[in-house]
Amino acid sequence: MTIRSIAKFLGWSALLVAIAEGAAIYSGARVLEKYEARAREFDLAQIDAFPQRSVMLDQRGDVYSHLHGENRFVIPFEKVAPSFIQALLAREDARFWEHGGVDFAGIARAAFTNARHSEVRQGASTITQQLARNTFALSGRTFDRKALEAVLARRIEQSFSKQQILTAYVNRIYFGEGYYGVEAAARGYFGKSADALSVPESATLAALICSPNRLGPRKNPAAAETERDAVIARMAELAWISDEDAAAARATPLRALAKDPLVIRADHVVDAVQRELVGFLKEEIIAAGGLRIHTTIDVALQREAEAAMERQLAALESAKKYPHPRKADFSPATSATGEEKPTDYLQAAIVAMDNRTGGIKAIVGGRDFSESHYPRATLSKRQVGSTFKPFVYATAFERGLLPCSLIDDSAIDPDAFRPVSANWSPRNSDGQYLGYQRADFGLIKSRNTMAVRVGQWVGLPTVRRVADALHIGETIQDYPVTYLGAFETTLRDLTAAYTVFPNHGVWQAPHLIQRIDDAQGRTLYSAPATARRVFTQERAWMTSQILQQVMQTGTAAKAASLGWKGPAGGKTGTTDDFRDAWFVGYTGSLTCGVWVGMDRPQTIMEKGYGATLALPIWIDVMKGAPPADYPAEKLAPPVPMARVHICRQSGLQATSECDALRTASDELLPATRCPGRTCHLHPSLMASTTSDGPMLRYTKEGIPVARAEAVRRPQLVDARATTPGGISFERTSRGLRFWTTAR
């Protein structure tokens, strides 16, 4: 071959090489462009978006629980111990401060080491690559994934500073046992914050990253210590710590906490808070976590309520003739453990509220949250029974009724309510009917016939408006049985309704969450002031006076024998066939409601009255309330009071004639409710004239005949009223009566 031909050949070869190199470069550039385009599809704002647990605080600001979610506490770079940053980089990325996201020198070193040992002994992923992989869930060990990860890492390096990248990494990475981020890991394993980590502790956590499940210091302390020492040796090799410090660190025994100190409760309080959160914040905000949820819960009172419930119900179940399955016999294997399903054993619910604020201080939705999540205190609706009667009477007091007014307690004709309610006649629980009695007697003794007559005199529409204002009227229907509480509401709403009595007519909206702050301390929600006046001070106080007598001589009179000695008011409630037992009562500072029953409505037990089943729980809860926080001081009237000599038939000032007829009594009433006129029902004594002169005629009981006839003869005081159903009412000289004109 001639020189010329050789030159020609070499020229063509060079040309071919050049063409090949150009094609490779062009092809590589095209491939790189594709990966860069794919990398631009990722939202780098996610680098700093860390889902984390929210913290729930009690009324004193102490941690009550951390809500479920990723166990992470986001902290700034300054809150991380320098020793941990050194240990992390020594283990994962020693050239972090020099490379631009991909460490080509590290790749070559790892490839050489792995080839020499014929196995993978070193990885080449940088901190930035790991951050990209963990943030955007890049999975798989393919070339495509590694290439995309590398290009994405370069983009991250161009958008964030090295310190920002490290901050994101230490807050995101997983450390095993449910710990995300170095702060959660430091608290969980060592019981301290990340800025207080020592060199051996820092090395232990850094060693965890490559295999968090295998190297857990609690699960495998020997392996964890071996890897820890390897990290310490690497730190010394890089001259980041001295040989002396390295030796001291390796000599330090590995001590991890035996138990996770993180408070994670699963109970009805946490469940109720999570349910309320959904109504206040968007789902994505809740899911992101990092919230500080300030609740109104008093932990001491909460524990008292839980203990009181279990103590009293267990005592009931221990009776020989108790008719239902007992909680002690509950079998998780055959029951709906932890679900929102009913149980087959006796249950109860408790709500305690601060009268001054409406804040819920204790809420117990059942006996064992692990066995049933059913929200009996907040969402379960049951018939309220006689606990509704105080609101019927208070409404009547607004219309002019007085506690001393006479109400007929006789049996009611079954046809009296046609066509509204056919063939219905309320019965008194003792089966007796006592004729005309004082209104306060009717509420103290919970007389059904009297409550119906008072309600019908006021009118169902008026009673419904009051119930709606108290947020308990949602299920009320247009039947007179409503006056006896034959409708459903929740324990939470009924307890809140009772705050009108200690609050002198003002209803307080119940709330469990006082304030919600985000991770930056910004307030996202604050409980609004929702107090509303429902009754005047005078009428609320008249009702409250009667409810205090309920606990002294009425249906809750056994309170004293159960250990309650302080001033309080309240009302029992029992529904048909003893299916629900209630007691709602209050002191000047605290209102507490208790419900007892079976999840599937059925007779609890024979004579299972509210005073028997619910009142003892209430007593235990209220006795356990810290007196410094919830003083049970004397319930004082909010308005000036005056003593008046009044006729119980007319509601006016009594005359000597009223005294003679024994219809007068001395009453202590709000000064504004004292009548200014004298009784006009009883005229002067009527005399008959004989040949011997004027002579009074007397009955055999010694009562002048004219007076006796006046007592027997109903006399109209208020105008008659007729309902659409044809029921007419009048207030007479002997009290309230009604009849029907419809047939």
Image: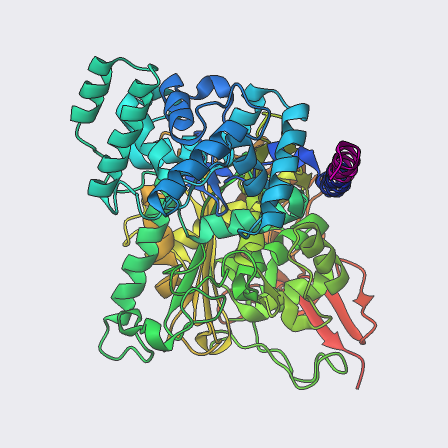
- Residue in the foreground of this view, choosing between 741 and 648: 741
Using the rendered view, name the quadrant where residue 199 is placed.
top left
The quarter of the displayed image where residue 617 is located: bottom left
Viewed as shown, does residue 627 lie left or right of 200? Answer: right
**Position of the C terminus by quadrant:** bottom right
Check the image and report above or below for 8 versus 81.
below
Q: Is residue 529 visible?
A: no
Residue 189, position in %: x, y? 31, 36
Asked if residue 117 lies left or right of residue 394, the reply is left
Foreground: 140 or 559? Answer: 140
View extreme (right): residue: 724
Q: Is residue 13 magenta?
A: yes
Residue 594 location in percent, x, y?
A: 44, 57
Rendered location of residue 202, percent (x, y)? 33, 26
| Residue 274 part of the magenta segment | no
Q: Which residues are magenta?
A: 1-19
Percent position (x, y) of residue 682? 67, 56
